[in-house]
Image (spheres, rainbow, N blue to C red):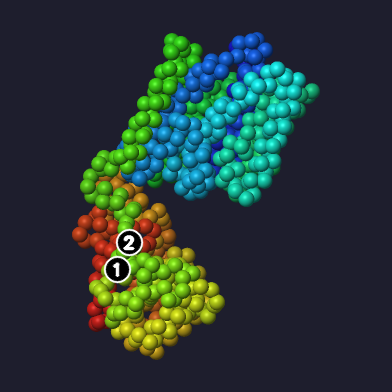
Amino acid sequence: MASDYRADIDGLRAVAVALVVGFHTFPLSVPGGYIGVDVFFVISGYLITGLILDLQSAGRFSIKHFYIRRARRILPALSVVMAATLIIGWFALSPASYNSLAQHTVASTLFVPNLIYWREAGYFDPSALNKPLLHLWSLGVEEQFYLVWPLLLLLLRRRKAQTTEILGALSAISFIYCSVTVYHDPVAAFYSPLSRLWELGVGGVLASRRLEMPHPEIASFVGLMLILGAAFTLTDTSVFPGLLAVIPVGGTAMLIAGRSWILSRRLFVAVGLISYPLYLWHWPLLSFATFLDFQTERAKGIVVAISIILAWITTRYVEYPVRFGSLRYYGATLSVALTFAVSLSAFIIFHFDGLPWRYPADVRRVFATRDYAFSIAARRSQCWIALNANFDSYQPACRYGEILVWGDSFSALLATGLPKPYAQFSRDSCMPLLTGKADDCAKGNAAVAEEILKLKPKRAILFGLWPGTNWQPDPTFNEALRFTLHRLRQAVDDVVLIGPSPIWSPGLPDAVLTFWLKHRVLPDRLRLLIPAENYYAADKVMGDIAKTEHVHYISIFDLLCNSGGCLTHTPASRAELLFWDYGHMTVEGATYIANKLGLARFDTPQSK
């Protein structure tokens, strides 16, 4: 079909891939660059429909040959990138992340990644950065389109006069579905092939009528402005796709019909010719850079440059030989075989849980901390209950012990470091404060306070996820804390208020693993993302209130942190972490902290 070659469409591909890469690399500069995928969808619908209709008109269309062409076009570069991603993952990813990558690889070889990501989360979630093959969701949509569209056009080959109307009607139904679904299930609207069919269908309608604009230069300019306008005004919070998707889709249709001479220039065409492998390469490399904490503007720029080089190499030495060169006649078989080999390798990785034996024993121990079994030790569902649970849900054992711990889930994990028996009243997401409100937390705390007044323990320890990580003057919090401490002192001589503990982002195991991957040694201390001044401000306010109420105040932050960062582990081993997520202690960490603070001794604890 060389005589039908459209240089401007390759130029349009260049625009689309530049927007996607720009969004993934510098999202603040190109906040709506994700619409480049919508541009690709329209182009695919146009080219595939045009190809099938032309071959049908010539009496040479074959489903078998259609899929052979698709295999030669899609599989070589895809297989190479997926294989490279698995190889890099071997060195860069934890067993859990490697296992997830393997699952996504298998899904991609079966062309259903969009369905897997639909089930897992949204495209704009922070966790998206941890999915090196997330961008292949769009390839899944296109392949699902390729399964249905040729069969549909075969059914319509004897009703050519109605082809455009039927394709338009199907596209309209898909558009309505998308526009409705985006409001009540935006993740489904984003990933579902049903909600994306209309975008490919618009391209199909264009191809079925061979529409051309009466004023192509004006149409091309308006179309390009629509695409660029959407790319620089939409954001990841826009209600998309749906009505807003009409802007880039309409702009793309106008550019295709207008045959833009600007996009036919050599530079645009050159980028367009490597657009597919560039799309494939850039996101895994950016994702791995994030894993390894290379997130500066310069680092991202280097990643994009490497992606462009790899895209050119892939085009020149992988795609062209299979599509046009010496490997053409058995390229489809070779491509399928390579894809099968990648899929089989990924399945083995998935079957063996991400191959944890790749790492030293101490690093594997850090990996295991991410799946820390805390429920039994923390007396989950016994002395640590759900936010909306009744006070009667606390078991009798929760009331026995000279030391009593009161607070949220943080308190439940701290309590595991105390010698039994100890009393415990922990409730999800509920700081130990008497606020006088009518919500579940306030009612539960009021009941706990009454119980403490009856039990009269020798020591009462208050701990929770205090607002120290984003400390702001809050008279309501201060008053509630003051009233709570005053109330407890009526029945308990020794009340201990423990201030905010370090909050890790990402969780401590992930932070430690990232450090190890970069330096090949487990850290002693790591810096927090949250400024130390926030913790000092919280300690100052809470400590002053405790002093006025004659209560011991303890700063965990002072114990664990200094100018070099915060301690990550117990003295036993750098692999024995203090916390198993962003702030909940391990039993070993709680034991170390409780002993250092003297929480189990009835002399004066380490007060601030």
Q: Is residue 402 above or below residue 71?
A: below
Q: Residue at x 29, y 51 (%)?
A: 368
Q: Nearer the viewer, residue 140 or 501?
A: 140
Residue at 67% across, 43% down: 179
Tell me the amino acid under the disc marked 2.
Answer: Phe
Helix, strand or loop under label 1: loop
At x 49%, y 29%, the residue is 278
Instruction: Count residues near mark 1 (Cα–Cα under 10 Å), then give few for <14, some for 14-19, many for 20+.
Output: many
Rendered location of residue 522, percent (x, y)? 26, 50
In the rendered view, would you say 226 is above or below 52?
below
Mark 2: few, some, or many residues within 10 Å (few <14, many ≥20)?
some
Q: Is residue 53 above or below residue 494?
A: above
Q: Could you tell whether 89 is left or right of 190 in the image?
A: left
**Residue 411 is drawn in which quadrant?**
bottom left
Quadrant of the drawing holding the C terminus: bottom left
Asked whether the residues under the numbered discs 1 and 2 touch, taking CB atoms below 8 Å apart as contact, a structural biologist would say: yes
Which residue, as the protein is rendered here, is positioned at the far bottom? 490
In the picture of the structure, the residue carrying the numbered disc 2 is 374
Q: Position of residue 239 (x, y in %)?
A: 64, 47
Q: In this orientation, does residue 160 appear?
A: yes
- Whether 128 is drawn above or below 338: the answer is below
144, 139: nearer the viewer: 144
- Front residue (pair 150, 253): 150
Label count reads: 2
The picture places residue 510, in percent across and down from the top left corner, at: 35, 51
Image location of residue 59, percent across then percent down:
64, 10
Q: Is residue 552 visible?
A: no
Q: Which of 356/468 is in front?
A: 356
Q: Describe residue 221's horizontal placement relative to residue 429 as left or right.
A: right
Q: Label for residue 416?
A: 1
